[in-house]
Amino acid sequence: MNKGMLTVGIILLSLMALLLINVISNFSTGGELDYYLVKETTEAAMEDAVDLEYYRLNSLVRIDKEKFVESFLRRFADSVDNTRSYHISFYDINEVPPKVSVKVDSNTVLSFSGSAANISTYIDAIIETDYDSDQVTANSLADLEDDTGKAIGSRSNN
């Protein structure tokens, strides 16, 4: 009887260990998958939300807030499966310069006392450009009579 109980104990302990490994693996893999999903979705939604007309007129990159949120939600919903529930929060959306901060919480199968453990993913994204100066400001300062805003080497010595 002693060896029988020891065998049952080893089997139960191994089943609990496999269950624990499965839950931890799901949690860590889910966090990594969520990070890359949110990152790629944010980048694509920001590219969709760039206001090309404003860029053509002012040579400045600007995103449209509503277009970004719509594109993000559409792309995110197309990419996820229905096994987990997600809560998406937009903390900061700047149009000029284009910057967004997004937080996505996803529920896991792991729960403590009736509340599920969440995986939180934060992303801050900024669109950068190659130009050196602000064309709108440079054009408006070129119309001024004085030397305000001009480079030191281009000021007239009166």
Image (cartoon, helix red, strand yellow):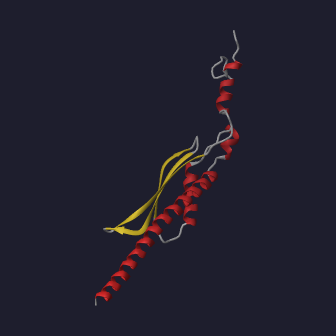
Give the percent coordinates (x, y) of residue 136.
66, 32
Q: Classify residue 113 as left or right of residue 148.
A: left
The quarter in which the N terminus is drawn is: bottom left
- Relative placement, left or right, of 12 versus 36 is left
Residue positioned 43% across, 76% down in the render: 18
User: Which residue lies most toward the top here?
Assistant: 158
| In the image, residue 148 above or below residue 66 | above
Q: Quadrant of residue 130?
A: top right
**Residue at 50% of width from left, 52% of height from top?**
102
Front-most of 54 and 48? 48
Outermost residue toward the front in this view: 3
The quadrant of the picture occupied by the C terminus is top right
Compared with 17, 144 (above or below) is above
- Identity of the residue furthest to the bottom in this view: 1
> Residue 149 location in percent, x, y?
63, 23
Q: Is residue 59 above or below residue 148?
A: below
Spot occupied by residue 65 in the image (x, y as percentages of width and height) = 55, 49
Residue 71 shows in the view: no
> Could you say which is closer to the camera, residue 135 or residue 121?
121
Note whether residue 113 is visible.
yes
Q: Report the residue that reaches farthest toward the left.
A: 1
Q: Vertically, is 114 above or below 95?
A: below
Name the residue at 44% across, 71% down: 21
The count of marks equals 0
Residue 97 position within the rendered picture, expressed as x and y whole percent measured from the top left = 58, 41
Q: Nearer the viewer, residue 54 or 105?
A: 105
